[in-house]
Image: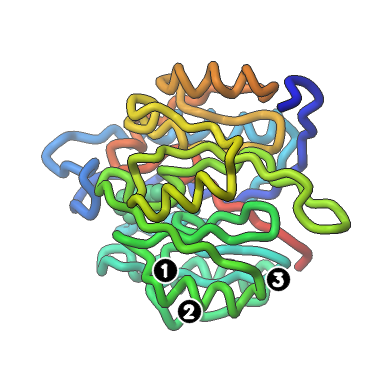
Amino acid sequence: MPTTGRIQQRRTYLMCRPEHFTVSYTINPWMEPANPTDTSRALRQWQALYDTYLRLGHDVELIDPIPGLPDMVYTANGGFVVDGIAYGARFRFQERVPEGPAFMDWFRDNGYDVVVPREVNEGEGDFLLVGDTILAGTGFRSTGDSHREVGEVFGREVVSLQLVDPRFYHLDTAIAVLDPVEGPGGVERADIAYLPHAFDERSQGILADRYPDAIRVSDDDGAVFGLNSASDGRNVIISPRAKGFEAQLRERGYTPVLVDLSELLLGGGGIKCCTLELRGPR
Ligand code: ARG
């Protein structure tokens, strides 16, 4: 593994200001409505993430928050956007169902071709593009049928992975895509990090086969949502609590950038959850 020369790629992200953030229902083990939330703190922490992306030279677009949809801040779940095509989300739980059309409207209004989903799926929460391959999670939110559908929509190979720990209910809580470098002949290098224990044995085998050089993070780093991070190929935005992962990234020549989203973790989301990548022309 090279320790220098990581190349930054400029990204375009979609985010949503957590103006209406609170925890008023429970759809994952992190959410406890009895615990108070601090919306102004959530806003400050979110702003730090937004400012970090801009400082690193990325483009960030915003979707307007809608009252009554406190989880809308987690834009990663709003769809999956590749090649200028936005595959819409169809949420598992009633509380978030209205977010699906809201995000599809935004994609349409902003020049993306929208594919209205037939199957239950929670967007980039469960679909990760690694080079030319889509890693797809199931077990808690997106269905296996949505894996077939996403493959048809984008004409790419889909690798289904089974999540087994309810704390890691979306794929982006258990895998981080670090360096998906594409060249003329396809993927030249694909570096990921993952939490083995979040997956069943078969899926662990698939990950070990396909990504023998992957960073395997500790359970401690996984438990603070260390993997719920955003990489531009060089800078990796991670939680300041994920100390071991931070060291692993440095060893490989990445530059960890620490952003604390502790308030948003009360809703069961972190850095990646608040970040949807917009790929391709529109
Ligand atoms: N409260 C949200 C939910 O349970 C959090 C979503 C986190 N998003 C993510 N991409 N992991 O749906």
Which sits earlier in the primary sequence, circle 3 or circle 1?
Answer: 3
Identified by mark 1, the residue type is: Asn
- Mark 1 and mark 2 in contact? Answer it, CB < 8 Å: yes
User: In the image, which disc is placed on residue 121?
Assistant: 1
What colouring does the structure picture have?
rainbow
* Count of residue discs: 3
User: The disc labelled 2 sits on which kind of residue?
Assistant: Pro
Q: Nearer the viewer, residue 243 or 108?
A: 243
Callout 2: SS: loop
Mark 3 to mark 1 CA distance (whole Å): 22 Å
Query: If you read the primary sequence from the N terminus, does the residue marked by circle 3 or circle 2 appear first?
Result: 3
Q: CA distance from mark 1 to mark 2?
A: 8 Å
**Residue sitting nearer the eye, 149 or 269:** 149
Q: Is mark 2 within 8 Å of ligand 1?
A: no
> Horizontal placement of 12 versus 62: left or right?
right
Q: Which residue is mark 2?
A: 117
In the rendered image, residue 66, in percent from the top left (x then y), is placed at 40, 59
Q: From the viewer's side, name the closer residue of 71 and 237.
A: 237
Q: Position of residue 223 (x, y in %)?
A: 32, 31
The residue that mark 3 highlights is: 111
> In the rendered view, would you say 212 is above or below 104?
above
